[in-house]
Image (tube, rainbow, N blue to C red):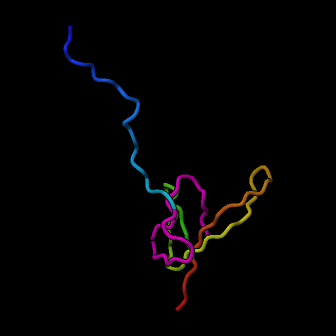
Amino acid sequence: MSHKKAAGTTALGRDSISKRLGVKLSDGQHAKIGSIIIRQRGTKYHVGLNVKRGNDDTLFAIKPGLVKFTTKKMKKFDNTLKTIKVVSVIPVTK
């Protein structure tokens, strides 16, 4: 007979590291060239003026300026309207 207690198993104890998603620059903040505005999975926010989308759906600025969030109604394939959020960078003139 064994005198060692059996080690129990647990379904807990595993946790994935956080991906640090979300809005990095808010409305009215200054963005440099290449600065990340939003990290996201999927397209919750869509690209606007002077913004591009990376391979992992990250939105980043391609020109320096102020970040501007707007909403826009877009027609889907089944002719229903959907309100989408658009992120733009407005260039600042000196």
Instruction: Label the magenta part by its dominant secondary structure.
Output: loop
Q: Look at the picture and state if 14 lies above or below 71.
A: above
Q: How many marks?
A: 0
Q: Is residue 77 left or right of residue 65?
A: right
7 vs 57, nearest the viewer: 7
Q: Look at the picture and state if 11 lies above or below 16.
A: above
Q: Tell which residue pokes out farthest to the top in this image.
A: 1
Is 46 included in the stretch rendered in magenta? yes
Q: Tell which residue pokes out farthest to the right in this image.
A: 79
Is 94 included in the stretch rendered in magenta? no
Q: Quadrant of residue 44?
A: bottom right
Q: Residue at x 74, y 63 (%)?
A: 73
Q: Look at the picture and state if 88 lies above or below 45.
A: below
Give x and y (percent) for residue 50: 56, 73
Q: Is residue 3 left or right of residue 43?
A: left
Which range of residues does the magenta coloring cover?
A: 23-48
Give x and y (percent) for residue 89: 56, 75
Image quadrant in which the N terminus is located: top left
Q: Is residue 36 left or right of residue 77?
A: left
Q: Residue at x 53, y 52 (%)?
A: 41
Q: Residue at x 46, y 75 (%)?
A: 33
Q: Look at the picture and state if 40 lies above or below 9.
A: below
Q: Residue at x 73, y 60 (%)?
A: 74
Give x and y (percent) for residue 63: 51, 77
Q: Tell which residue pokes out farthest to the bottom in this image.
A: 94
Give x and y (percent) for residue 70: 65, 70
